[in-house]
């Protein structure tokens, strides 16, 4: 279990301490009993919790709570005297072999002596509780579980459960056993990978447990009900087609993924990296007379060959860059630059207001943080509410046609590409900067390819931050009920404080790759244009 203690520093006698408890990945849901034991020499004794909820309505020595996946349990305790204490628990029902776990060890000391001087400090007012906090926590958990490392663990579990599935095995520390196919010839290896990617992304994006098909917690259902999408039930055409249940329609199950994640992977040259490898695999030259990949020679006895062959064979079944580019414009008005991109006049509609609405919101958030951090100022959060409402309406306007399907499909294909780039044979061929810390094992291959092809010098790490944090920000705005008239400035303040880390990480990464500081001013220049300008300046120096 994961325990977060507040305060986290020294604990003084007669001080209240709050323990926030949640399940770790893989721990079973169910009932758990918690108690606090005081250790005195060889003697141990359970202390009186005085009412674990801080209400002091009753005196108890232990408390039993049902904890679900995604959910948290808070327990507040007042330590009346100094000593060494341990927070312990065991699962219910209690059996002879049920292990007792020590979750936290607390040293309680006497409080500081009274000082005739009265300390005075200015602190910001605590933000009120928000009804949408469950939705935001759900979005964070989904994003964390869609990480590449989680996919590796999912593949490992699938192999353990079904030996007939021909796929790789995650070994930890960024190492993977290769995907293999049986038979080893043909595209069976790639089909196995794609099936696993599709299964993983679909389950997780709907809030289900990736290791158990269809398993959803009450926390997930509560988060779905908080989304404004859950109120659109009356728009469904009835009756449903024969043989299809109402629950099979994805209205209440819109996948919690955003296409902006794939857009930033596109700008990071992740797809282009593998496309160049595929071209060389097929003995096709891309670009000028000199091909930096001329020395590529994939061992036909190694599994990477089956992955590349299967991907080349399935090219007609995968999304094209033209189709992705058209949807970037439809949902966000974001343009790509390249020979394969269709001209603007071929598009029916684009979301021209998105970039201004999004960057205005980010800029307003940073100014709000600056005012709130100044303890002599009472920051007004109402402008944030207006900006959230504006961006919410822009996103909602583009949530139709391919909205529920294309982002999910693109995310599945992104996982496919990342897995192929993470293969050990790819590292052996491309090489990579050995001393650069990367968050995921496919990243160094992309930066190496960018160096070989003389593309952008910007690290793929910054593009990943834009994808990871940008997706969560937009999901919280898209699914929030920001167009409802009863919302107040406090709701926008809660949102800004909850997403502060993601917002500031996004703005920093945006400045790192485009050179534009969104803190200083609102810039609505297309990111692709800014990236092209930086690349032109780089090439002018050579």
Image (cartoon, grey):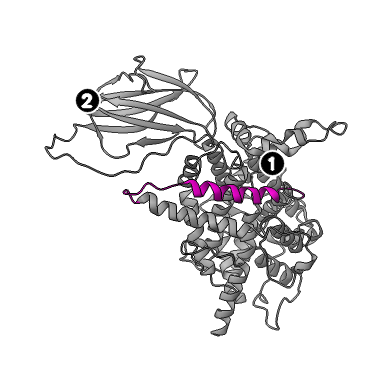
Residue 290 location, x and y as percent?
68, 82
For the residue carrying disc 1, how many other residues have a C-alpha within 10 Å: few (<14), some (14-19), or many (20+)? some
Question: In the image, residue 493 lies at what x, y percent?
Answer: 47, 44
Badge 2 marks a residue whose secondary structure is loop
For residue 478, above or below residue 132: below
Image quadrant holding the N terminus, namely: top left
Q: Is residue 542 above or below residue 250?
A: below
Q: Which residue shows up at 47% across the image and 42% down it?
A: 494
The answer to whether one can see residue 423 in this image is no
- State the residue in front, 352 or 341: 352
The residue positioned 65% from the left and 32% from the top of the image is 215
Which residue is at the far right?
242
Residue 429: name its quadrant: bottom right
Sequence-wise first label, 2 or 1: 2
Whether residue 74 is visible to the viewer of this picture, yes or no, is: yes
Q: Which span is picked out in magenta? A: 374-401
Depth check: 201 or 444 in front? 201
The secondary structure type at the circle numbered 1 is loop
Looking at the image, residue 396 lies above or below residue 96 = below
Mark 1 lies on residue: 254
x and y, in percent, of residue 90 in the image: 44, 24
Residue 81 circle label: 2
Q: Kindly identify the residue that appears in the image at 18 percent across and 31 percent down.
A: 110
């Amino acid at each position: 279990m994961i325990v977060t203690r507040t305060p986290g520093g020294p604990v003084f006698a007669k001080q209240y301490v709050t323990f926030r408890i949640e399940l770790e990945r893989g721990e079973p849901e169910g009932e758990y009993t918690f108690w606090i034991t005081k250790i005195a020499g060889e003697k141990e004794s359970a202390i009186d919790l005085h009412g674990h909820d801080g209400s002091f309505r009753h005196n108890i020595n232990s408390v039993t709570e049902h904890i679900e996946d995604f959910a948290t349990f808070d327990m507040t305790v007042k330590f009346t005297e100094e000593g060494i204490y341990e927070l312990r628990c065991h699962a219910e029902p209690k059996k002879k072999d049920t292990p007792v776990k020590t979750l936290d060890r607390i040293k309680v000391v006497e409080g500081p002596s009274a000082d005739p001087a009265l300390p005075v400090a200015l602190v910001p007012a605590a933000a009120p509780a928000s009804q949408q906090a469950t939705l935001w926590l759900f979005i964070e958990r989904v994003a964390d579980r869609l990480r590449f490392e989680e996919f590796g663990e999912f593949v490992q579990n699938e192999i353990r459960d079904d030996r007939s599935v021909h796929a790789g095995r995650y070994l930890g520390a960024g190492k993977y056993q290769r995907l293999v196919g049986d038979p080893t010839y043909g595209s069976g290896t790639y089909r196995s990978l794609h099936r696993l990617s599709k299964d993983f992304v679909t389950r997780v994006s709907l809030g289900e447990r990736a290791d158990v098909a269809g398993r959803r917690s009450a926390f997930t259902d509560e988060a779905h009900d908080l989304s404004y999408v859950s109120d659109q039930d009356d728009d469904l055409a009835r009756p449903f087609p024969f043989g299809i249940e109402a629950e099979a329609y994805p209205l209440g199950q819109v996948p919690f993924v955003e296409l902006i994640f794939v857009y930033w992977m596109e700008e990071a040259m992740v797809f282009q990296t593998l496309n160049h490898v595929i071209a060389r695999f097929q003995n096709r030259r891309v670009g000028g007379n000199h091909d930096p990949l001329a020395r590529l020679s994939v061992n036909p006895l190694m599994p990477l060959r089956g992955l590349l062959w299967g991907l080349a064979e399935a090219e007609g079944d995968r999304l094209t860059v033209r189709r992705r580019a058209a949807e970037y414009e439809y949902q966000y008005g974001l343009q790509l630059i390249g020979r394969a991109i269709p001209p603007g006049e071929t598009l029916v509609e684009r979301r021209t207001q998105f970039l201004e609405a999004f960057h205005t919101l980010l800029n307003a958030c940073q100014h709000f943080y600056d005012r709130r951090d100044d303890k002599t100022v009472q920051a007004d959060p109402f402008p944030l509410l207006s900006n959230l409402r504006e961006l919410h309406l822009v996103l909602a306007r583009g949530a139709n046609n391919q909205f529920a399907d294309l982002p999910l499909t693109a995310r599945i294909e992104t996982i496919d590409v990342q897995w192929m780039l993470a293969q050990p044979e790819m590292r052996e061929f491309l090489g990579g900067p050995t001393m650069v810390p990367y968050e995921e094992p496919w990243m160094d291959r992309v930066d190496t390819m960018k160096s070989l092809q003389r593309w952008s010098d910007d690290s793929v790490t910054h593009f990943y931050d834009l994808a990871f944090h940008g997706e969560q920000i937009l999901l919280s705005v898209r699914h929030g009920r920001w167009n409802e008239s009863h919302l107040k400035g406090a709701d926008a303040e809660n949102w800004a404080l909850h997403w502060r880390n993601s917002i500031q990480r996004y703005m920093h990464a945006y400045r790192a790759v485009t050179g534009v500081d969104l803190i200083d001013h609102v810039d609505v220049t297309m990111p692709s244009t800014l990236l092209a300008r930086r690349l032109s300046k780089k090439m002018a120096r050579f």
